[in-house]
Amino acid sequence: MKRFAYILLIGISAIISCTDSPGTYYPRYSTFPNEKAISARVIELDTVFFRYPFRVAVKDSMAIVMDLHNADYYFHAFTYPNWKHIVSFGKRGEGPEEMLSAETFQFDSPDAIYALDANKMQISRWAVSAENRLATRQEVIQLDKSLVRSLDFYATDSCFLIPDYLGEHRYWQV
């Protein structure tokens, strides 16, 4: 009896497997019903490309744009209102004239800015010349090591006010 059940099971399986399929579920196309073409055109630009322009400040005829996630430079100076590129400065790096990070900046005069580098714990003053298309670092103010990663500052006539994130004081006067 067992032998008969096995033969019957094999016979039914053979008959089912040899029958034609009921139809194609996934038809194949030789062409698509709707075709669209994509084309591109290169547009030449004479400007600086930013990865993440984060802060913008305008003073008289100069605008400074800070690029937070840059490839080379943190700051880019432009004429205002024409937005013609003057110079890029604040080179990214670990050298003495370079910056590890840039948190914020503030105009000191129409042709100079202060920039805060929290990782190096310093504020730099940069002079920007639109005529010479040049930016030079004029001075570096080292911050006290007791400050915890300062992220902001305010320049007054005689000092800098820096927020205290530890809570001992509201501001540090540097």
Image (tube, rainbow, N blue to C red):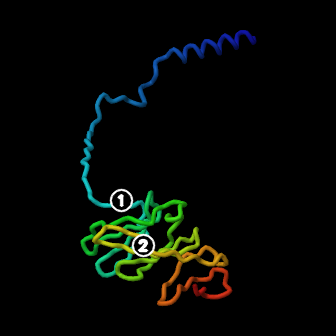
- Secondary element at tag 1: loop
Does dot 2 land on a helix, a strand or a loop?
A: strand
Placement of 14 over or under 148, stated as above or below: above
Q: Residue at x 50, y 90 (%)?
A: 158
> 159 left or right of 38?
right
Q: Percent position (x, y) of residue 81?
A: 26, 75
Q: Nearer the viewer, residue 41 or 79?
A: 79
Residue identified by numbered label 1? 49
Q: Is 102 placed left or right of 57 in the picture?
A: right
Residue 65 falls in which quadrant of the image? bottom left
Amino acid beneath label 1: Phe
The percent position of residue 58, horizontal first and vertical second, equals: 34, 78
Nearer to the camera, 167 or 23? 167
Q: Specify which label sits upstream in the sequence, 1 or 2.
A: 1
| Residue drawn where x is 67% and y is 78% of the image | 146
What is the quadrant of the C terminus in the image?
Answer: bottom right
Task: Give the vertical position of 164 relative to 24 (above or below).
Answer: below
Q: How many marks?
A: 2
- On screen, residue 49 versus residue 157, left or right, reads left
Q: Residues within 10 Å of mark 1 (few under 14, many from 20)?
A: few
Q: Residue at the spot x=55%, y=75% of the render?
A: 151
**Figure quadrant of residue 54:** bottom left
Residue placed furthest toward the bottom:
157
Cα distance between the residues tagged 1 and 2: 15 Å
Which residue occupies 53% across, 61% down? Answer: 95
Residue assigned mark 2: 55
Instruction: State the image quarter where residue 88 is shown.
Output: bottom left
Instruction: Where is residue 18? Give x, y as percent.
Output: 51, 14
Q: Amino acid at mark 2?
A: Arg
Asked whether, in this view, residue 50 is left or right of residue 167, the answer is: left
* Residue 158, placed above or below residue 64: below
Q: Work out whether residue 101 or residue 55 is closer to the camera in this orientation and state it.
A: 101
